[in-house]
Structure formats: structure tokens, C-alpha cells
Amino acid sequence: MNAFQELPRWPQLTDDDIEAAVAALRSNRLVGLGNSVVEEFEAALAAGHQVEHAVAVSTGTAAVHLALHALDVGPGDEVIVPAHTFIGSASPVVYLGARPVFADVTPDTHCLDPDSVKSLVTERTKAIVVVHINGVAADMAALTAVAAEAGVPLVEDAAQAMGTEIGGRPVGGFGDLACVSLFEQKVITSAGEGGAVLTNNPVYAERVRRARSHGEGPVEGRPGMIWAHEVGYNYRLTSVQAAVGLSQHKRLGEMVEARRRNAAYLSERLAGVEGLELPVEPEGTTHAFWKYAARVAPGGGRRSAGDIAADLRSRGVPVLLRYPYPLHKQPAFAQQHQGVSLPVAERLSEELLALPSHPALTEGHLAHIADEVRKAVSVTV
């Protein structure tokens, strides 16, 4: 039997996580304003990201939606989004009646390219969404400068970057707002789904809190009464999810350390493989390595990254292409972006492999992965 068929799945919930969920269930307070478990989780997220406010919501996509809602993005507006990312970074723009404008990414970090962004800013640009893809930090100094010059707010999409740092500061506090995801496969999870909006701006925080629960809030002068101040959404996080998230958050540091250790092991074992470019960690940053994305350089008689990935999967190694369809080429957006050329994102869609590296993997698993990748990449056509 192929030993890799025994590869453990991620996430790995502990007894503490499960007991926290059970305690929340037994409290009989599952949803509602002022839920103490949710508030405790929000306080932990805010402190961990060194921001003033964290508002827990139902998903990472909901977090992006509410962040843009807080900025009053609407019909006629444009929001710049990288083409190389998950659709959840862009679809909330459309929810609000605005238009996503796709920018290219850098060939080394695969994050938003500041020069591409600068070329796309118009008088209709209402926000810029910066994705810290795979756990690597985007160039926030350059992107903040572009945004400041244009007078446009920045939203950090840190869905894949819990534990990522720039100059010792966690990402999520560099933009006007930031979003995190707590989906089951992320760095930490809140029982399968969840997210949060982070900000230092109290006005944005209050707008997000209100909008996540149908736009409802207190009626001035009438204690205990609420009404809808605006049309909002049903994006609340339950106390059970918050309890699991809080339990997992206590282990965030050790889980990121394990990911970094596993990534370092893979890089050591894959160093020198001809035609394989390994992930970079920009100077002064800490890469959380939610994904270990390696590039297969074309040419030299090598097979395509797609063929290599298929070969590895046939032998039990769960390797996938990383974002094989850039957003501007997908049916949801292609009609509105015909003729758009974003060469780096398009090239990466055909050349990036996502290798397993999560904390549940042992050194034996990682050695097997590295050996199989070395063999697969070395096969010529």
C-alpha cells in the first residue's frame, strides 16, 4: 500500500476544541447580540492582530462583503482586486453592484502588483483589495503609497494569512479594514466556517457590527428597543463556532511555527531541483505558509505543471495546480473583461503547484512528498 494514502487531513480538532464547542452548546446561548463567547473571541482576534476592533462574521467572504459595505461601495464604483486569488475576494464587489477591476500580481510573491494597481486607478475606484496570498505578505508599503496617492482605502484580505507578519506586526492592521477567514482548511478554523473584519476605525467597526445582523441597532431614547437603521445581512457567527475558534486561536503560534518548519523542510529537500522555483519569503516578513506554492518553469523538456500534478495525484500525492483559472478568465467575470491581459497571473495559473505542508504532516510524510515531487519534475517529454 502506498504510505501516502494514510496522509492525515486538515484540520485536526483537539479535545479542547471539542469540549469548548460542547460547553457553548450547553450554555443555551447560541446566537445573539452581546454573546460573551463571541465577544471573547473578537477580543482575542483584535489583540492578536494588534487592532482596535474585530467583528466576527459567518465566513471570510462575508467579511469582504461587509468591509466593502462599510466603505459604501455601490453601483458605478470600481474595486481593484488581484486576478490570482480565490473568487471570494471579488464576488462581494458584484454583490454590492460595483465592478471588480482585475490587477496583475508579482512573479515572486504572487501578491498584488503595485504598478498594475496604479495603472488601473480611476475616478471610479472606491477601494483596493490586497490579498496576502498563500500566507506571504503583500508589499504593503508600496500598495499603501499607491492608495494614499489616489485617496482610495485599502482592504486587506488576510483569509490565508493568519500568522503572517511584516516587520514583526501581524498583517490585518496595515489597511483601512482587513478580513480573515476561519474556513475549515485555513490556518485555524471556527468549526468549519467563519470570518472576521478587523479595523482601527470605530465608525467602520460599528457599521460592520450593525450590517452583520440585518442592519439593526438601538433606538435612541428607547432602552431595549432596536430597529433596522439600514438594510443589512444575516452574517452572524454562533457561539459554538466562536468557542472552537477561540480554542484554536490559543494555538495559532504553534500551528504557524509547524507550517513554517514543514515549509523549510520541503525547501531543503527540493533545493536544486532543476526547473522548480520554491516559495519566497520577502525580507522583513514572516510567511505563514498556509499553502506551499512552487512554480514549474516551462521549457527544458519538462512536462507541464498540470501533467506533473496529475502524475503525483495518480500516485497518491494530493498536489493541485494553484488557481489554474485567473478570475478575469472565469465565466463569472470573463464577459466583462474580454481582451484583458494580465500576463503574470495567466502564466502562474499554468505553472504553480500547491504541495501539502499542514501541521498534521510528519517528517516522513514530507520526505515522501519531496521525493515524489523530485521524481515527477525530473521526467522529461
Image: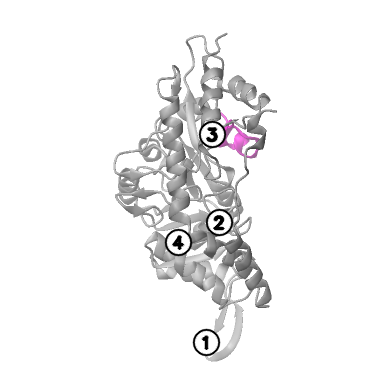
Q: Which residue is mark 1?
A: 220
Disc 2 secondary structure class: helix
Q: Closer to the observer: label 4 or label 2?
A: 4
Residue 309 found in image quarter? top right
Which segment did they paint magenta?
A: 322-339
Q: Which percent across, then down, holds residue 127?
A: 44, 51
| Amino acid type, callout 2 | His
Q: CA distance from mark 3 to mark 2?
A: 41 Å
Using the image, tell me which numbered label, if any, was put on residue 65: 2
Q: Are marks 1 and 3 in contact (CB under 8 Å)?
A: no
Task: Please name the amino acid that badge 4 sits on.
Answer: Leu
Residue 60 drawn at (x, y percent): 56, 54
Q: Residues within 10 Å of mark 2 (few under 14, many from 20)?
A: many
- For the C terminus, the quadrant is top right
Question: Which residue is under mark 4?
Answer: 198
Q: Amino acid at mark 3?
A: Gly
Of the image marks 3 and 2, the number of the one nearer the N terminus: 2
Residue 313: image location, x then y, percent: 65, 27
Distance between mark 1 and mark 3 Cα atoms: 62 Å
Answer with left or right where residue 323 lies relative to residue 154.
right
